[in-house]
Image (tube, rainbow, N blue to C red):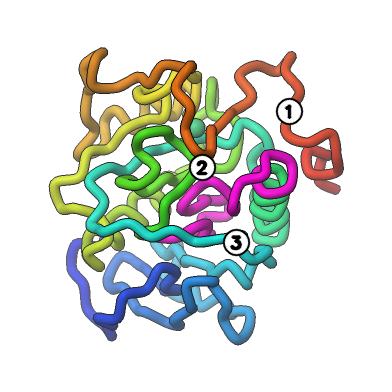
Amino acid sequence: MGDKVSGSVSTSSLTSPAILMDSEHWEQQQLATSCGYSQHMQQANLGDGVATARLLSRSDWGARLPKSVDHFQGPAPYVIIHHSYMPGVCYSTPECMKSMRDMQDFHQLERGWNDIGYSFGIGGDGMIYTGRGFNVVGAHAPKYNDKSVGIVLIGDWRTELPPKQMLDAARNLISFGVFKGYIDPAYKLLGHRQVRDTECPGGRLFAEISSWPHFTHLSETEGVVSSTAAPVEPHVHPKAATQTPLAQSPPAAPKV
Ligand SMILES: [Zn+2]
């Protein structure tokens, strides 16, 4: 984990910084606007090997523009971990990019939300994909959407543990957020199930994050939001395989 930080650091308030991260340094490689437009596809620069993770901008994965963007004042006191359930795990970057587009399609077109619900996605390729970004109100955890960073680990993690590069990328992202001031250094790490009646982020992944720094047990009264609550953008995960997953469209189709 990159506790030591060097390299160029911008003090401007950005919601979607595109960065190169590795075990030795964080390098802010390219800056994007709040709508996430970068000028070109960033080329991988993974010379340092396995510990490297990269944050890709919205334009990298072909995001549609958000319908609107609502900011909240950081730093965020909570980090909330999700799994996507569907789409399933992706191991190549093109595949993970498509998974991001599929989730955005589902959330924005099917659900009618402003954008993909999550702040960031993590692929099985070890890459970090900018969703709404830091300090943008999300649609992933009612009551916490305006005070958290919502990170989805793409895949179904009920019984399987995400691959190491995926877990490392998630932890690197949190460290980066703390370093940049987007996440409170005293943040509380939660699984989605702690604040809503859902199996998300899956039992195996939840057990894993329970051992991470800053994981916090919430009391009954502090945590779960009644399902009768009416958040502005209710976040829904398919709960079981018998339930209709995502859209009935190509998004959920197996990748070739
Ligand atoms: Zn969730």
Determine if the magenta segment contains residue 212. Answer: no
Q: Residue at x 56, y 81 (%)?
A: 38
What range of the chain is rendered magenta?
Answer: 107-134
Above or below, comparing residue 78 to residue 132 in the picture: above
* Location of residue 95 (image quadrant): bottom right
Q: Which residue is mark 3?
A: 66
In this view of the protein, which residue sits in the foreground, 222 or 80?
222
Helix or strand or loop: what does disc 3 sit on? loop
Residue 184: image tag: none
Q: In terms of secondary structure, what is the magenta stretch mainly?
A: loop
Nearer the observer, disc 3 or disc 1? 3
Q: Earlier in the sequence, mark 1 or mark 2?
A: 2
| Kind of residue indicated by mark 1 | Pro
Q: Which residue is mark 2?
A: 153
The image position of residue 10, as x and y in percent, is 28, 83
Name the residue carrying label 1.
245
Q: Are marks 2 and 3 in contact (CB under 8 Å)?
A: no
Asked whether mark 2 and ligand 1 are closer than 8 Å, the reply comes as no
Q: Position of residue 127 (x, y in %)?
A: 52, 59
SS of the residue under disc 2: strand
Q: Position of residue 256 (x, y in %)?
A: 85, 48
Residue sitting at the far left = 186
Q: Quadrant of residue 57?
A: bottom right
